[in-house]
Image (cartoon, rainbow, N blue to C red):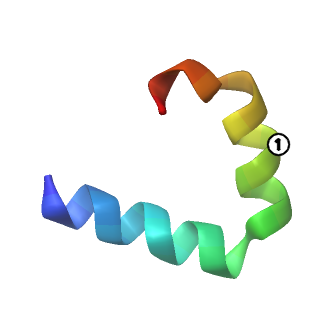
Amino acid sequence: MTELIIMFANWKRDNPDEFLRWAEEHWFLF
């Protein structure tokens, strides 16, 4: 599970626009 969190953090840092777009569609996961 830790790897997944790190992957998310790196993705959010490297591709904030793409991440935000995805997060809007999957906000219920958070």
Q: Is residue 23 left or right of residue 4?
A: right
Q: In this view, does 29 lie to the left or right of 21?
A: left
Q: Is residue 14 above or below residue 7?
A: below
- Badge 1 marks a residue whose secondary structure is helix
Residue at 62% of width from left, 67% of height from top? 12
Q: Position of residue 27 (x, y in %)?
A: 63, 27
**Amino acid at circle 1:** Arg
* Snapshot quadrant of residue 17: bottom right
User: What is the residue that sits farthest to the left in this orientation?
Assistant: 1
Q: In this view, does 22 lie above or below 4?
A: above
Residue at 16% of width from left, 63% of height from top? 2
Q: How crowded is mark 1: few (under 14 residues within 10 Å), some or many (20 or more)?
A: few
* Snapshot quadrant of residue 8: bottom left
User: What is the residue that sits farthest to the top in this orientation?
Assistant: 28
Q: In this view, does 5 lie to the left or right of 30?
A: left
Residue at 38% of width from left, 67% of height from top? 7
Residue at 67% of width from left, 80% of height from top? 14
Q: Where is residue 24 in the image (x, y as percent from the top left)?
A: 77, 32
Q: Tell me the residue that label 1 is attached to.
A: 21
